[in-house]
Amino acid sequence: MQAVVGALRVILGLDSAAFEKGADAAEKKARYFAKRLEALGQGLTSFGQSLSTSVTLPLVGFGTKAVAAAMDAQKAAASVDQALATMGNRAGFTSEQLQGMAAQLEKASTFDGDDILSKVTANLLTFGNVQGDVFERAQVAALDLSARLGQDLQSSAIQLGKALNDPVKGITALSRVGVSFTEQQREQIKAMTAAGNVAGAQAVILAELERQYGGQAAAMAATDAGKMQQAYIALGNAMEAVGAAIIPVLVDLSRYV
């Protein structure tokens, strides 16, 4: 019996030592594994933050710019609609036709279509005597004048509108910015206006503008810098389309805020 008990003690002692040794090894492995999990967790957190910064924020920024671009386009169209509402359709074109003209002028220049609508079209509409073919030629002349002189579209449009609406007084303003008229042309414009032939006087003014500044906007667009600007404009138009799709969603969401 004593021999059996002794044997058991030896076996239990050995088993106890083996167990303790195994437990220590297991504990070390558990601590190592825990540290790996903690490092993995920190890595995932860092990746998540990086993902938020490099992906989410740029998407939000793009969406914001797209909405702003779409709002600018809507404002430009609204300025034309308002000018038509207050002045009547004296120019002889609908809002859709005028927007189509602006789009074509955009393609042949370095000027954005929204700027053309709000700064050229809408302003020329306020001059009741600028109509039909004269209106179309005046829009082109405004772009050429700005391209050549480096002045903003609105200034060019207003100068041209004044000159064409009241030729005798208007050509003085054009002369101040460098558009030159001969004395014969001045007398011709004065005589035509006095005889009620405003269209004839307008034709003289536009012909001289086209002789001196014609094709300037298109020439600028044909340069490398002009092509780059047109690429930016095309990108802006794409953003407008995205923004136009986002705005109705934001309007709906605002009802629940």
Image: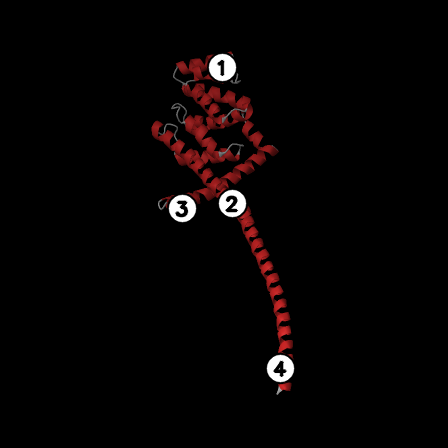
Residue linked to disc 2: 57
Task: Tell me the distance, in whole angstroms, between the alpha carbons under discs 2 and 4.
Answer: 70 Å
Q: Residue at x 57, y 57 (%)?
A: 38
Q: Amino acid at mark 2?
A: Leu
* Image location (x, y in percent) of residue 116: 47, 31
Question: In which quadrant of the rendered view does residue 200 lie?
Answer: top left
Tell me which numbered mark, 3 or 1, is placed earlier along the sequence.
1
Q: Residue at x 41, y 43 (%)?
A: 247
Q: Amino acid at mark 4?
A: Leu
Residue linked to disc 1: 185
Tell me which numbered mark, 2 or 4, is placed earlier along the sequence.
4
The quarter in which the C terminus is drawn is top left
Q: Amino acid at mark 1?
A: Gln
Q: Secondary structure at mark 1?
A: helix
Task: Tell me the distance, in whole angstroms, between the alpha carbons under discs 4 and 1.
Answer: 130 Å
Q: Amino acid at mark 3?
A: Val
* Image location (x, y in percent) of residue 167: 43, 17
* Image location (x, y in percent) of residue 134: 44, 25
Residue linked to disc 4: 8
Task: Tell me the distance, in whole angstroms, between the alpha carbons under discs 3 and 1.
Answer: 57 Å
Q: Secondary structure at mark 2?
A: helix
> Mark 4 against mark 3, which lies toward the viewer?
4
Tag on residue 75? none
Tell me which numbered mark, 3 or 2, is placed earlier along the sequence.
2
User: Where is 158 relative to 93, above or below?
Assistant: above
User: Where is 233 relative to 174, above or below?
Assistant: below
Q: Secondary structure at mark 3?
A: helix
Task: Tell me the distance, in whole angstroms, between the alpha carbons under discs 3 and 2.
Answer: 19 Å
Q: Nearer the viewer, residue 38 or 154?
A: 38
Residue linked to disc 3: 249
The quarter in which the N terminus is drawn is bottom right
